[in-house]
Amino acid sequence: MLKLFKEIRKAGDATTGYPFEPLEMPAGFRGKPEHNEKLCIACSACAIACPANAITMELDDKQSRITWDISYGRCIFCGRCQEVCPLFAIELTGDFELAVLNKDDLRESCSYEVACCSRCGKPYASAKEVDYARRVLESVGGTAAADIEKVDLCLDCRRFDDAEAFAHQAPERGEA
Amino acid sequence: MTTKKQAALRVGETHVQAVRDTFPGAVLDATWQAADQVTITVPTDMLPDVVEFLYYGRGGWLPNMVANDERPLCGCYALYYLLSMEESDPGFVVVRAEIDPDTMEYPSVTPRVPACVWSEREAFDMFGLRAIGLPDERRLVLPDDWPDNLYPLRKDSMDYRKRPAPVTDVENYSFLYEGNAEETTEVPMGPLHITSDEPGHFRLFVEGEDIIDADYRLFYVHRGMEKVAESRLNYDAVTFLADRICGICGNAHSVAYAEAVENAQGIEVPVRGQYIRAILLEVERLHSHLLNLGLVCHYCGFDTGFQHFFRVREKAMDLAVLLTGARKTYGLNLIGGVRRDILDEQKLATIKYVRELRNEVEALVDMLVSTANFESRTAGIGRLDPAVARDYSPVGPCVRGSGIARDVRFDHPFDGYKFLVGLSARSHDGCDVQSRTLVRVEEFMDSLTMIEQLLDGAPEGPIQTEDWQYTPHKFAMGYTEAPRGEDMHWAMVGDNQKCYRWRAKAATYSNWPILRYMFRGNTVADAAIIVGSMDPCYSCTDRVTVVDVKKKTSTVLTKDQLEGYCRRRTHSPLAGKGW
């Protein structure tokens, strides 16, 4: 019995001041994901990786804007989005206080302009992603940037071009 | 010469040979899915003989049976009886039998090996496969209001988002009474368990205060995860879903699923990844065992101890946050390895936590076992006869408290456990609540030692691999020792980057069928502590109903009444009510 009292005395007060004072989470804690819409190029990598479908990308009816959307109600805080983002535009923070009074407040979204193919006019990627690809190719330079204007083409048109180029090279390969 | 010959034999080869010798012509096919896993296909009518032979004749235990709708693959259904061979030639032997989709029938193995009972009942619920001779043909998983002839896991049955309209408004589940005494009282306990506050309906058959028999019904919170995984998720995202099977031992499920796929696809996890998986599994055990020890204090009326175990448990939770970024649902497993490394500073902090936990828990355990109530409340209570244990293949501290040292960490070492030295499975032979508690105490201390050894031994290097080819329709088992016993997962991936079939067996699934034997011969006041000693993983009841079979009356006890009675054992809440 005496031992027990000693232990109680030694343990002291186990409670913390939270919620009347802030509670710091250690580095690496996986809390609310914060999206940086300026860095984001709307490439959809996070939406594909998200196991819970908390992050979605949707094209509007006119196919002119693509909307990135997260539902914190669905989020499981696994951090796959952070891992796959090529531009570090999404990061899990130490914030764990996510309760809201209105369910709609659990959603956040932002929309991005969609680029259309310069030849066929079909929407094919977000304008920021196309721009990013162009800038990366420019900075690399050399052969990588040789056909840089092709970033303005959709995948189908590029395939068509490739097939045509292949056909033109047939005589060089010695084919009839 | 003989040693050379033995070395050339694959794991499980001796068992396959023994089956061939005993039942000529029974083995239609034998294939190895992984180094320690072999699947033999036998004729359906030989199934009970072969499983019984491997179980009792060759030292096998039966964690689970998996049913699978293989009509798109081979035109029939298939059953896989997973057997863990734990005497000679340790490994896994899976007995597979094909079932004709026209008759949908197979001979039940349960009369020979009782451990199959739940799996065979579930196979009927999910696939409509009827086990001929199964003594208990009630539904197991599906609710009373589920339509007949709708078998959710058949490939052509239903969309996972659909919920059929209820077919009945009344509960028509019948509880089975196996005792001899005619004049008993029926005590319903549920729909929530008294102490774990989780759903499960118990029916105690009592004579006065003594429990003669008990039956129970669970799966009130069946979430259909297997169906969701097969329909919606890609196979590599299922680790995150598996993390959510249990709020306490989710990581064990996540690892078990990942290993099932890795074993099937022949993926070798880098050694450092294997160490980290083992460390995280042990971190999970720390908080789980502390939780149970706290609850034991609570049942014994030693609530100060309960508070202090929970205070110390918070350190184990902090350790998990440090290493994984979350208190629970660690979410660190991917097919091919883990996602987060343990850095040097985290290693040092972990060692500090481990030392503190060891000192503090030693002091608390000392106090718990020297409490007079502990001895009197737990010794000789809830006896699990080793013979019953042998028949039903229970797992974890439950079976280890009955003198049987089964533990997949040592029986079939996987991941970082392969590299441990000087440790072995713990067991106590009191067969009672006390033994199960003491096993947990020792395992907790072992876990601390394991974490230290694993941290020290982990080599440098990568923690995950992406180097594999995806091959459809390969299947294998994955297994881990969760705090409550082995988790056994069986997975077959399909040709669409999804699970074709995923069967997740939680530890407690193996333990529920023995509970009625543990109840027998105890008093109503012991019921809560017996269930608690199993450390069950489900949702418990809030209320208990007591039914007098003789008088055909029933009384509903509240949680507080029963819990209080469990601790005081005086002032029976049934007194004065004609009991």
Image (cartoon, rainbow, N blue to C red):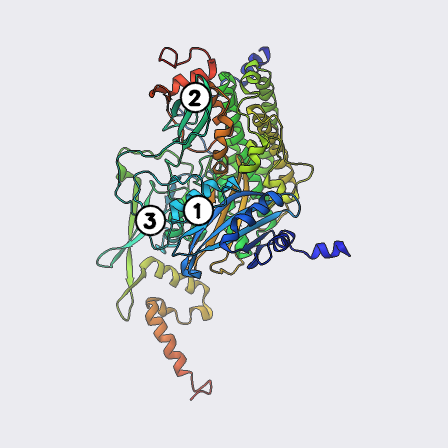
Q: Amino acid at mark 2?
A: Val
Q: Is residue B375 left or right of residue A75?
A: right
| Residue B519 screen position, x and y as percent | 49, 26
Please name the residue that numbered disc 3 is placed on. B160
Q: Earlier in the sequence, mark 3 or mark 1?
A: 1
Q: Amino acid at mark 1?
A: Ala
> Label 2 to label 1, Cα distance in Å?
32 Å
Please name the residue that numbered disc 1 is placed on. B131
Q: Amino acid at mark 3?
A: Tyr
Crowd tier of the residue under label 2, counting other residues whose Cα lies within 10 Å: few below 14, some 14–19, many 20 or above: many
Q: Are marks 2 and 1 in contact (CB under 8 Å)?
A: no
| Residue B446 screen position, x and y as percent | 62, 32
> Label 2 to label 3, Cα distance in Å?
42 Å
Between disc 3 and disc 1, the foreground one is 1
Q: Secondary structure at mark 2?
A: strand
Looking at this rendering, what residue extends furthest in the left direction? Answer: A62
Q: Secondary structure at mark 3?
A: loop
User: Please, which chain is the residue tagged with disc 2 on?
Assistant: B
